[in-house]
Image (cartoon, rainbow, N blue to C red):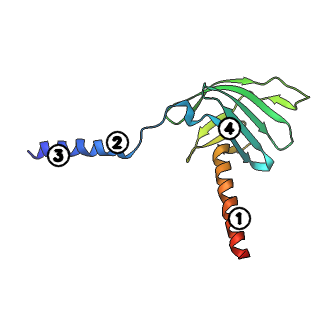
Amino acid sequence: MRYFIGLVLLFAWLGTANSLTPLPDSSPSFFSGEWGGTGEQGTYCYLNLSADGRGWVLIDGGSGDWLGARMQWRNLKQTLQVEKIIPLAASTQRRIMPLAQFVLRSGFNQSLNLTWNAQSYGCQLQKIETMTHHLNRARSTIDGLLQGESK
């Protein structure tokens, strides 16, 4: 009887654990959108990820020139998986050099880390939509504080 009760409690506990933790999101919309962020020495990184699994990567290492590539990607249980990298053609007019390899890692709170060579620490990226929302909230808070001071 104790064995049976222990088994029932185990299955009840496992069932509640799943209901408290949502399953990982594997939809393309989880990562799709524009991403931006910075790294060391004035580095700026930009990603544009489409819901159809295609995307663009641009990296400005601080000099004003871009390293660039197109990519194919997929969402594997909230882990961004790069399937294929297609370096952009070099263009002196647009100041673009091909980016042959890079690594994207998923982080906490829907953030990404982009590295492209052993010498760089890479860029920390967030969705631009999220950054814009936080920026607007901060501006609104400052405006409210300034209006409170003027009264």
At mark 4, the secondary structure is strand
What amino acid is found at the position of numbered circle 2 in the picture? Answer: Asn
Q: Which residue is mark 4?
A: 34
Residue extending farthest left: 1
Around disc 4, counting alpha carbons within 10 Å, would you say few (fewer than 14), some (14 to 19), or many (20 or more)? some
Query: Distance between the Cα atoms at labels 4 and 3?
Result: 50 Å
Name the quadrant containing residue 93.
top right
At mark 3, the secondary structure is helix
Q: Is residue 70 left or right of residue 92?
A: left
Q: Earlier in the sequence, mark 3 or mark 2?
A: 3
Residue at position x 62%, y 42% from top?
112
Q: Which residue is mark 1?
A: 143
Q: How many marks?
A: 4
Residue at position x 61%, y 27% from top?
73
Query: Distance between the Cα atoms at labels 4 and 1?
Result: 28 Å
Circles 4 and 2: CB distance less than 8 Å?
no
At mark 2, the secondary structure is helix
- Single out the mark in the foreground, 4 or 2: 4
Where residue 128 sits in the image (x, y, percent)?
Answer: 68, 44
Where residue 46 sits in the image (x, y, percent)?
Answer: 73, 38
Circles 4 and 3: CB distance less than 8 Å?
no
| Foreground of the two, 132 or 1 | 132
What amino acid is found at the position of numbered circle 4 in the picture? Answer: Glu
Q: Which residue is mark 2?
A: 18
Around disc 3, counting alpha carbons within 10 Å, would you say few (fewer than 14), some (14 to 19), or many (20 or more)? few
What amino acid is found at the position of numbered circle 3 in the picture? Answer: Gly
Query: Distance between the Cα atoms at labels 3 and 1?
Result: 59 Å
Q: Which residue is mark 3?
A: 6
Residue at position x 68%, y 26% from top?
71
Using the image, determine if residue 145 lies above or below residue 127: below
